[in-house]
Image: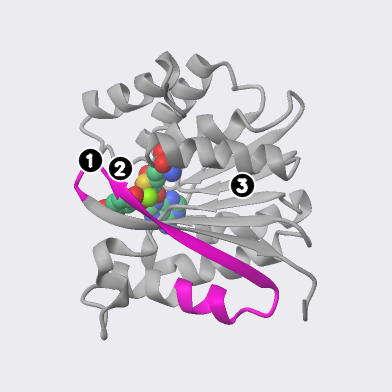
Amino acid sequence: MRFAPEDEALRGSIARARAENVPTIQISPLQGKLLQVLALACGARAILEIGTLAGYSGVWLARGLPPDGRLISLEVNPRHAELARATFAEAGVSDRAEVRVGPALDLLPTLVPEAPFDLIFIDADKMNYERYLDWAVTLSRTGSLIVADNVIRGGRAFQTPPPDESAAGAAAYTRKILAHPRLVSVAFLNDEDFNDVEDGFAISVVTSAGQ
Ligand code: SAH
Ligand code: DHB
Ligand code: MG
């Protein structure tokens, strides 16, 4: 018995990345299944992802949407975007999953007319996580979920001072969700088997202020 078996499309996403020498730094199958469960649990119809890579997490998210739902995934690297589009086609979710290419901080302001998003998944460059959080809250509504990968970085995010920019970005993110008046948050450790790094997955729910 397995909770998060991968089908051809999910395996294909990883295989395509490997074949193109793109790093296979996608979330784990259980994280993917959790994203699908969260999307279904909050009745998500509009999902935003920041950091597409080859579409692995995007497939799990799209599988948490109804047929007329929508996933917008932001990706700076056009090669990654192409791999993700092939993955979405193979998974049969191209009708609801779209990749937009550019630096996320340039694209996020253009999404205001398409907000609110019911679930926002943050998984791009770690040093901008705080800014992505600000945008995620702006583009959300009360009851939206904001999820972030890589908030622990093998413990480096909890060292003072954090030893590198990505650990510092992850630490700033965690500090901000814990202090935020509208967010109620939890995180758990994930054992990333591709590089043996224990990393964190943070889940926040957006509440009305003062709850
Ligand atoms: N969510 C993916 C993994 C994402 S890896 C999965 O689990 O399947 C991080 C991705 O963020 C990479 O593809 C990288 O190119 C992209 N990225 C890095 N900086 C970015 C930026 N400023 N804007 C948008 N995407 C960015
Ligand atoms: C890296 C990025 C990720 O999103 C991840 O889950 C693991 C590693 C990285 O940029 O090295
Ligand atoms: Mg990640």
Expressed as whole percent of the image width and height from the top left, the position of residue 164 reads 23, 73
Q: Quadrant of residue 83?
A: top left
CB of mark 1 near ligand 2 (< 8 Å): yes
Image position of 145 (left or right of 86): right
Q: Which residues are magenta?
A: 173-196
Q: How many marks?
A: 3
Q: Quick one: quadrant of the C terminus? A: bottom right
Q: Are marks 3 and 1 in contact (CB under 8 Å)?
A: no
Expressed as whole percent of the image width and height from the top left, the position of residue 131 reads 52, 70
Expressed as whole percent of the image width and height from the top left, the position of residue 123 reads 44, 52
Q: Closer to the observer: label 3 or label 1? A: 1
Label 2 Cα neighbours within 10 Å, binned few <14 / some 14-19 / many ≥20 = some
Q: Quadrant of residue 82?
A: top left
Of all residues, the one furthest to the bottom in this rendering is 160
- Residue 25's tag is 2
* Residue at x 46%, y 66% (from the top left corner): 129
Residues under labels 2 and 1: Cα distance?
7 Å
Residues under labels 3 and 1: Cα distance?
25 Å
Q: Amino acid at mark 3?
A: Leu
Of all residues, the one furthest to the front in this rendering is 1
| Residue bearing mark 1 | 194
CB of mark 2 near ligand 2 (< 8 Å): yes
| Residue bearing mark 3 | 48
Element on which disc 3 rests: strand
Indicate how the structure is coloured in the image: one colour
